Amino acid sequence: MNNSTKITGVILAGGLARRMNHQDKGLVNYKARPLVSYAIAALAPLVDETIINANRHHEQYQQFGLRVIADQNARFDGPLAGILTAMINTDTDVLLVVPCDAPLMTTAHLQKLLATRAELDADVAVAFDGERLHPVFLAIHSRLQSSLQDYLASGERKVQAWLACHHAVQVDFSESPDIFTNLNTLAELSALEIQ
């Protein structure tokens, strides 16, 4: 990877968490730490800056000492809106995007996303577990900003449909599919705690 490439980590924490009783997922504790802290730790060795994209509870997120940015509007338009917001608020070449609720993802896994994108000079590298894509685990070049802006302005929101319009490469994580375990409900959180 080119050492002069600047990278911004983006943690997506902007959803409504309906299935988590509307609690802010990133701030829910897993093994005595807020979920978002796992994403922060995994990103830290790889990025020049980490941004948290959150649409609620900014003060709590600011306690992590990172920039916290809200979507461009209050419609909760999903992950792509958070990615676009991050692109608008940074001048780095590449964004390394992760959700706030996947505590098993490590720095080594994220490094693989970055390295694959750089090696192939792809627009996007997206995680693949051997069966399906995980389109909120991305290394994405900021040159896609205007395309993303146009896509969202047209009323579309589907991440995979937008990715299909670009030079996107799949990064194979089939040896460790459990790293994509994300916590959508309090029951899932409890089940993972005791594993």
Image: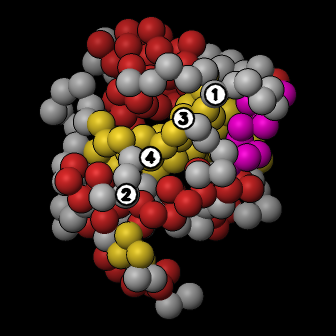
Nearer to us of marks 2 and 4 is 2
Could one spot residue 136 in this view of the protein? no
Q: Earlier in the sequence, mark 2 or mark 3?
A: 3
Q: Amino acid at mark 4?
A: Ile
Question: For residue 115: magenta?
Answer: yes
Where are the magenta residues, as a range? 110-119
- Quadrant for the C terminus in the image: bottom right
Verify CB contact (< 8 Å) between mark 3 and mark 1: yes
* Residue on which the image places disc 2: 64
Q: Amino acid at mark 2?
A: Phe
- Mark 4 nearby-residue class (10 Å; few <14, some 14–19, many ≥20): many
Q: Earlier in the sequence, mark 2 or mark 4?
A: 4
Secondary element at tag 1: loop
Residue at the image point whose x is 63% and y is 27% from the top: 6
Label 2 – label 3 distance at C-alpha: 16 Å
- Quadrant for the N terminus in the image: top right
Label 3 – label 4 distance at C-alpha: 10 Å
Q: Amino acid at mark 1?
A: Lys
Nearer to us of marks 1 and 4 is 1
Verify CB contact (< 8 Å) between mark 2 and mark 3: no
What colour scheme has been applied to the protein in the rendered image? secondary structure
* Residue on which the image places disc 4: 11
Q: State which quadrant residue 180 falls in.
A: bottom right
